[in-house]
Amino acid sequence: MENKFGSEDEEVSHRLQSCDPWAVYSAKRFRKLAGLQGAQGLTEQQRRIYEFIKSKGKVTFEELYRTVHLPQQELENQLAVLRHCELIKGQSEDGKVYIVPF
């Protein structure tokens, strides 16, 4: 059956903006009001990604992609959420971009 979002069998993917000041403000405010720190309040998938990045200190997107086995768009969305919560950030080093803990 068709609906305005596509067929029921079709998975609709939405791209989150990783650099979104309003999303950062909202996520930080919500987490503060809820008393959440670190990995508290994350989904299991987000927690796995965050803990992996923390354990390595820095990773490339490609390394993370090979490790977590998520579709690229889903991984990008999960990283955007973690960035909005200011748990991770991008860092340029020797011409490469790494994902590092905030």
Image (tube, grey):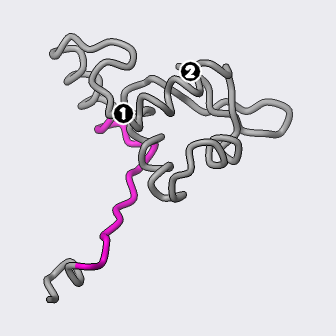
Residue 78 placement, left or right of 58: left
Q: Which of the numbered marks, if any, corresponds to residue 101?
A: 2
Callout 1 amino acid: Glu
User: Image height check: is 34 above or below 85?
Assistant: above
The front one of 63 and 96 is 63
Tell me the mark number nearer the camera, choosing from 2 and 1: 1
Asked whether 93 falls inside the magenta stretch, the response is no
Mark before the other along the chain sequence, 2 or 1: 1
**What residue is pinned by disc 1?**
44
Mark 2: secondary structure: strand
The front one of 61 and 21 is 61
Residue at 27%, 24% in the rendered image: 41
Residue at 41%, 34% in the rendered image: 46
Magenta residues span 9-23
> What secondary structure predominates along the stretch shown in magenta?
loop
Real-space Cα separation, disc 2 to disc 1, in angstroms:
18 Å
Rendered image quadrant of residue 29? top left
Rendered image quadrant of residue 97? top right
Mark 1: secondary structure: helix
Q: Name the spot of residue 56 as percent of width and height, x first.
A: 67, 22
Rendered image quadrant of residue 9? bottom left
Callout 2 amino acid: Pro
Q: Which of the numbered marks, if any, corresponds to residue 23?
A: none
Residue 62 placement, left or right of 101: right
Q: Name the spot of residue 77 as percent of width and height, x first.
A: 42, 49
Residue at 49%, 27% in the rendered image: 50
Query: Where the N terminus falls, by quadrant?
Result: bottom left
Residue at 53%, 19% in the rendered image: 102
